[in-house]
Image (cartoon, grey):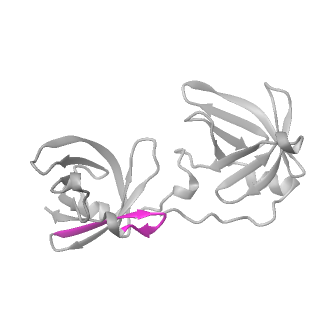
Amino acid sequence: MSAETQSTGEIPTGKALEQQLSGKRVLVENAPKGTFLSFLKGGVLKQESRGWPDELDRWEIEGQMLCFEGRRPRSCAVVTKLTNHDLFLIEPGAEENRQTVEMHFVNQDGVLLQDVIAYDGVLAGKLRGRVITTEDVNPSEILKGSKTVWDFETKDRVSMTAFDASGFPFPGGTVVYNSKDNDLCLTPPDEKPVCIRVEVSGSDVRMIPLQNGALVEKEAMVGTIE
């Protein structure tokens, strides 16, 4: 369900690069969870860190370099990659000491743009209030006879409970769900969506996980819908 990364081609410089970044929000790879940078218009850089007040600094473009200035001494790095989803910088200096900083564009909810799904909610609407009981088509030896009950209790939340072959329940959980076409997408807390292709024939259901847009048939589940 992830869109393919589209390169912007040759990396722009000067005002063109500034326009490409202005208004964008990024997650910095390896930064503490919940940390984001926003390249606001007018050269204002906003840093958001979970549990701390937002901090404001300055950013500007010099040729193909992105420069930061504010509470810390001015520093600049060369933009080496710019796509619809990613921004890579490399710090100047001796080659053996250079470090690449990887940034990924996110939306206002902190979701990576490459993981944003254009939901239509049609399948989700049909599942609301229904219960589906499934079992793996190719279970491991330890999971043979086990079942999972999906209870679409509200318009956007589904609870899942697993039972072993004897009917003993395991701890379950509730996650947010939505849909696009025939794909059911689950969004665990602070995680990217996980999608499953849902095929319904009468009361019979087949659910096939999707990984990078491809169906993973070996992990398919079958069951019934109530």
Q: Residue at x 52, y 56 (%)?
A: 115
As drawn, the residue found furthest toward the bottom would be 201
Give the vertical position of 88 relative to 138 (above or below): above
Q: Is residue 151 visible?
A: no
Question: For residue 214: magenta?
Answer: yes
Q: Nearer the viewer, residue 165 or 150?
A: 165
Q: Nearer the viewer, residue 166 or 188?
A: 166
Magenta span: helix, strand or loop, mainly?
strand
Residue 225 picture quarter:
bottom left
Q: Is residue 32 visible?
A: yes
Q: Position of residue 72 (x, y in %)?
A: 80, 26
As drawn, the residue found furthest toward the front would be 141
As drawn, the residue found furthest toward the left would be 166
Q: Residue at x 67, y 39 (%)?
A: 37
Relative side of 177 to 22, left or right: left
Q: Which residues are magenta?
A: 204-216
Q: Position of residue 139 (x, y in %)?
A: 24, 59
Question: For residue 195: magenta?
Answer: no
Question: Which quadrant holds the C terminus?
Answer: bottom left
Residue 114 picture quarter:
bottom right
Q: Position of residue 79 (x, y in %)?
A: 80, 51
Relative side of 217 to 7, left or right: left
Q: Residue at x 85, y 35 (%)?
A: 75
Q: Residue at x 75, y 37 (%)?
A: 44
Q: Please give the count of numbered marks on the rendered protein.
A: 0
Q: Position of residue 181 (x, y in %)?
A: 38, 70
Relative side of 66 to 22, left or right: right
